[in-house]
Amino acid sequence: MAGTSTDGIAGERRQLINVAYRLLGSLAEAEDAVQEAYARWYALPRSRQEEIVSPGAWLTTVTGRICLDMLGSARARRERYVGAWLPEPLPESLPGRAEWDHGHGTDPADQMVLDESVSMAFLVVLESMTPAERVAFVLHDVFRYPFAEIARVLGRTPAACKQLAASARRRVGGARAPVTAAGQGDAVRHVKEAWEAMDIAALVDLLDPAAVMTADGGGMAGTVPHPIEGAARIAQYMVAIAGKAPGLELRERSVNGVPGLVAERAGVVVTVASFEVADGRVTRIWVVRNPEKLRLWRGAADTP
């Protein structure tokens, strides 16, 4: 049957990676989930494969169930995580593309569609949901899967899945609408300039008075263990860090599809910063320094 051809099944990988990353907030975990789904498919007897009308739908269901299980266990792991946990930031493209392709196959970053549903602001909101809410919301509101299919993933009725998505939608409803890339880019550029100049007053002016900075070092890189609140405190912290880290180079880079900043030392990315901007001022800063979450930013040579 054409539906069970190798090419047809392999062609589902892009969609599955996109679904799994939005569900898990980690490209590494998303790849694991999709790989496990494919392993289960190929473990089926040929006769069972031929009975499945839509292999793509089957793979989506299995990937969703695997992600649901992973989200449940992730909650326990994140309770033991050192400091704040943030989603894995994605670069626009992967350094060392040729080396990655030669040693690892298709670049996972190339599998991702970078849109509003992978912005750091959106992913952080998804973290506030229960695993079931997140699955129902992402599959329905982001990928437009019908509730009848989502019900097979969650093991609930379509009506229950609809309620879960509605509950999740209320959480998202409080989030600010994203600014244009140009507007965000201007704000990020001004922050970079003020940071490089170690100008506290300029930074305070660029930050919303109630701005919050959250940093993720995972216990492997120095960060503040708790969010920093308030423009003045954030500005003072940023300038203090700049003074203690000579040799850092700040670069404007796309982070999860929107303008952000990357700090490099000796050509190696050590920090990735994402921003949320409203009314011309930065309201949230998310800083990822955990080296395990920067693997795609460091090139194929440093990737396990």
Image (cartoon, rainbow, N blue to C red):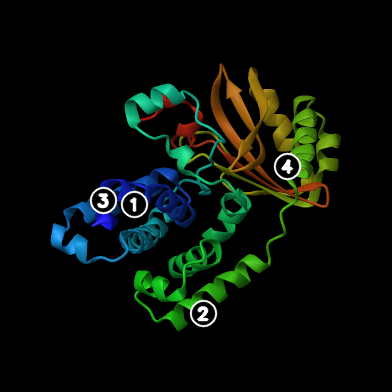
Q: CA distance from mark 1 to mark 3?
A: 21 Å
For badge 3, the amino acid type reads Ser
Q: Are marks 2 and 4 in contact (CB under 8 Å)?
A: no
- Report x, y in % for residue 142: 54, 61
Q: Residue at x 40, y 59 (%)?
A: 71
Residue 285's place in the image compared with 197, above or below, is below
Q: Regarding mark 4 in the picture, which secondary structure is present there?
A: helix
N-terminal of the pair, mark 1 or mark 2, is 1
Identify the residue position indicated by label 3 in the image.
5
Disc 4 packing (10 Å; few <14; some 14–19; many ≥20): many
Q: CA distance from mark 1 to mark 2?
A: 26 Å
Q: CA distance from mark 2 to mark 4?
A: 39 Å
Q: Is residue 115 left or right of residue 193?
A: left
Q: Residue at x 38, y 48 (%)?
A: 13
Disc 2 packing (10 Å; few <14; some 14–19; many ≥20): some
Residue 170's place in the image compared with 82, above or below, is below
Identify the residue position indicated by label 4 in the image.
234
Which mark identifies residue 130?
A: none
N-terminal of the pair, mark 1 or mark 3, is 3
Identify the residue position indicated by label 2 in the image.
163
